[in-house]
Image: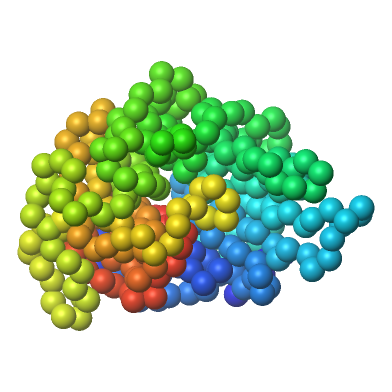
Amino acid sequence: MPGTGGSAAGGAAGLLAFGGDGDVFTMRPDGKGRKQLTKVAGGALARDPAWSADGSKLLYAYSPPLPNVRGPGGLLPLPVTDLYLMNADGSNQKLALEHDAPGAGYETPVWAPDGKSVYVTYTALIVESNIVKDEVVEVARVPLAGGARETLAPNAMTPTISADGRHLAYITTQADGLSLVAADGDGKNAKTIVPIGKVDLVSSPRFSPDGKQISFSAASPMAPASPVAPVATATPASAGRTSLLQAPVAHAAALPHGLPMDVFVVDADGSHLRRLTQLGEDSPTTAWSPDGKRIVILAGGGIYVMNADGSDFQNVDQHGGHSSIDWRR
């Protein structure tokens, strides 16, 4: 089991929560006040924190170390991922949602607006004769108080839900690539809004607070895939700000690390696709400030904050991570 361990850039206030180096941290958006909330054992992983609506609690995914010995009958040890809940200061950490089978797990959690359930990437390994044959990957909704898991989208991952709960978005996984899909909050009326081939390796969508836009990451193209604003590369905050516009996880929710990726935004109906950064970063994920005016990026090379149009881009911390990031008031 895991253990415990103001002002902001551009005038934005609040508190960030993110995963890095196997643990969950919080930090102000100006890069100050970094605090470690978990202290997991070697080989374990805590990641993908998500703030409750009132900002008092955090959900996060936790994968314990794999056993060093085989199970009964020589069965291979299989990875599992549970969801844990803790107070905003890291206290009172407790199990919230336990895996339902060996090799299964709940990842990339986001709270339902009413706080009673959680949207997750559910994964489960299919094992035959001690050999992993396949894997289930789906977007699901699970009651936190106990109850059946509801599949909302098969062959899908990394859900995001609008603040009013009316709209859901996620990444679909197909043999020929990944696409960004939007649907009703119950998973019905699904519509592809960024199809396969529009950009490559679409990942980690996140609704803006007003539900009108979705930020996501994708492999950096040599040329923009659609009309975009001028872009600029990252500059540390200490070196001054630029006024120019800026050009999953343990199982199948993870993309290969090291691929150059950037942040894009698209309207919720699929129109006005545009590229906000020209970072070429490792596995960037995003979160919007509560007022929708700023976007934070967590990536392998650091943490960045910018305006929602990509301007006023700052590198606020050079110590990043491969996880989700979330922003509360």
Q: Residue 191: x and y, percent?
A: 36, 24
Judged from this view, the residue extending furthest toward the top is: 189
Quadrant placement of the C terminus: bottom left
* Front-lying residue, 3 or 220: 220
Residue 38: quarter of image: bottom right
Report whether 211 appears left or right of 141. left
* Front-lying residue, 260 or 271: 260
Q: In percent of the image, x 45 and y 57: which residue is there?
A: 256
Q: In percent of the image, x 29 and y 38: which residue is there?
A: 197
Q: In percent of the image, x 48 and y 74: which residue is there?
A: 35
Q: How is the image coloured?
A: rainbow
Report whether 233 appears left or right of 185. left
Residue 33 visible to an observer of this rendering = yes
* Total numbered circles: 0
Judged from this view, the residue extending furthest toward the bottom is: 238
Residue 146 versus residue 309 in the image, above or below: above
Report whether 110 appears left or right of 190. right
Q: Residue 143: x and y, percent?
A: 63, 35
Residue 164 visible to an observer of this rendering = no
Residue 70 versus residue 130 in the image, above or below: below
Residue 228 versus residue 139 in the image, above or below: below
Q: In percent of the image, x 79 and y 56: which residue is there?
A: 76
* Front-lying residue, 261 or 222: 222
Report whether 197 appears left or right of 246. right
Q: Residue 22: x and y, percent?
A: 56, 69
Q: Residue 111: x and y, percent?
A: 51, 42
Residue 327 versus residue 200 in the image, above or below: below
